[in-house]
Amino acid sequence: MLVENADLRQQMGRQAKLSIQEYSWENSIHNLVNIWQEGINEQLIIARQSVGRVSRLEGTVEGDNGQWTMEN
């Protein structure tokens, strides 16, 4: 039984402290930022592919920062 086993209680306590670090605010924010960045990167790839298709059909496309070409 756990009540009678001091070594097991201490080992479980140490393991609990290590495992709870996975759920810290710092790690949670880091994971959330990574998820957002992956989504942004996917959207950038899709946007660049769309611009590439349009520029092949029409030559160039006007973007917010000037002309977009296949090189962008």
Image (tube, helix red, strand yellow):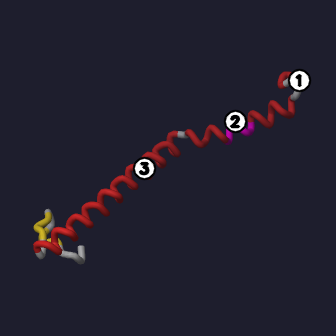
Which element is circle 1 on? Answer: helix
The disc, 3 or 1, on the residue closer to the chain's N-terminal end is 1
- The answer to whether residue 32 is above or below residue 20 is below
Q: Which residue is mark 2?
A: 16
Front: mark 2 or 3: 3
Q: Nearer the viewer, residue 62 or 19?
A: 62
Q: CA distance from mark 3 to mark 1?
A: 45 Å
Q: Amino acid type of disc 3? A: Ile
Which element is circle 2 on? Answer: helix
Q: What secondary structure characterizes most of the magenta part? A: helix
- Taking the spot 24% from the left edge, 73% from the top edge, the residue there is 72
The disc, 2 or 3, on the residue closer to the chain's N-terminal end is 2
Q: CA distance from mark 1 to mark 2?
A: 19 Å
Classify mark 2: residues with Cα within 10 Å, few (<14), some (14-19) or many (20+).
Answer: few
Q: CA distance from mark 2 to mark 3?
A: 26 Å
Q: Which residue is mark 3?
A: 35
Task: Point out the stretch of residues depicted in magenta.
Answer: 14-18
Q: Amino acid type of disc 1? A: Glu
Residue 42: percent from left, percent from top: 35, 58
Which element is circle 3 on? Answer: helix
- Taking the spot 44% from the left edge, 46% from the top edge, the residue there is 32
**Is 25 situated left or right of 53 in this image?**
right
Q: Which residue is mark 1?
A: 4
Classify mark 1: residues with Cα within 10 Å, few (<14), some (14-19) or many (20+).
Answer: few
Quarter-of-image position of residue 5: top right
